[in-house]
């Protein structure tokens, strides 16, 4: 179960990082309280999200699946 959760969060973080990369490729203005959100915010957020995604995938790779108790009994 933990491996699935790590993979899911890695995918979500990866998609969010991709959305920030798309904002850099196709400049889209994002307004917050009537002010434009600076592109440097998307750059830093994208980097952090990409690193979190990589971290989740590496953690999922290191996580071992639990052994099936039925196999041990046979």
Image (cartoon, rainbow, N blue to C red):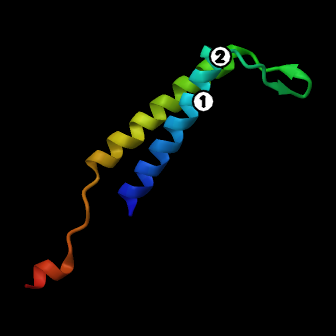
Most foreground residue, 14 or 54: 14
Q: Is residue 5 above or below residue 25?
A: below
Residue at 47 percent across and 35 percent down: it is 52
Q: Nearer the viewer, mark 1 or mark 2?
A: 2
Q: Position of residue 18 (x, y in %)?
A: 54, 29
Q: Position of residue 51 (x, y in %)?
A: 46, 30
Q: Which mark is residue 39?
A: none
Q: Position of residue 34 (x, y in %)?
A: 92, 24
Q: What residue would you read off at disc 2?
A: 26
User: Residue 43's image quarter?
Assistant: top right
Q: What residue would you read off at disc 1?
A: 19
Extreme-front residue of the structure: 26
Considering the image in quadrants, where does the C terminus appear?
bottom left
**Secondary-structure class at tag 2:** loop
**Left or right placement of residue 63 versus residue 40 in this view:** left
Residue at 69 percent across and 15 percent down: it is 27
Q: Position of residue 26 (x, y in %)?
A: 65, 16
Residue at 84 percent across and 25 percent down: it is 31
Among the two numbered marks 1 and 2 on one chain, the one whose residue lies closer to the N terminus: 1
Extreme-bottom residue of the structure: 73
**Secondary-structure class at tag 1:** helix
C-alpha gap between disc 1 and disc 2: 10 Å
**Left or right placement of residue 45 versus residue 72 in this view:** right
User: Residue 65's image quarter?
Assistant: bottom left
Q: Is residue 3 above or below residue 38?
A: below
Q: Is residue 10 above or below residue 40?
A: below
């Amino acid at each position: 179960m933990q491996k699935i959760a790590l993979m899911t969060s890695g995918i979500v973080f990866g998609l969010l990082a991709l959305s920030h990369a798309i904002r850099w490729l196709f400049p889209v203005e994002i307004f917050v309280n009537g002010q434009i959100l600076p592109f440097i915010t998307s750059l830093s957020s994208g980097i952090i999200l990409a690193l979190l995604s990589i971290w989740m995938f590496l953690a999922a790779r290191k996580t071992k699946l639990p052994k099936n108790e039925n196999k041990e009994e046979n």
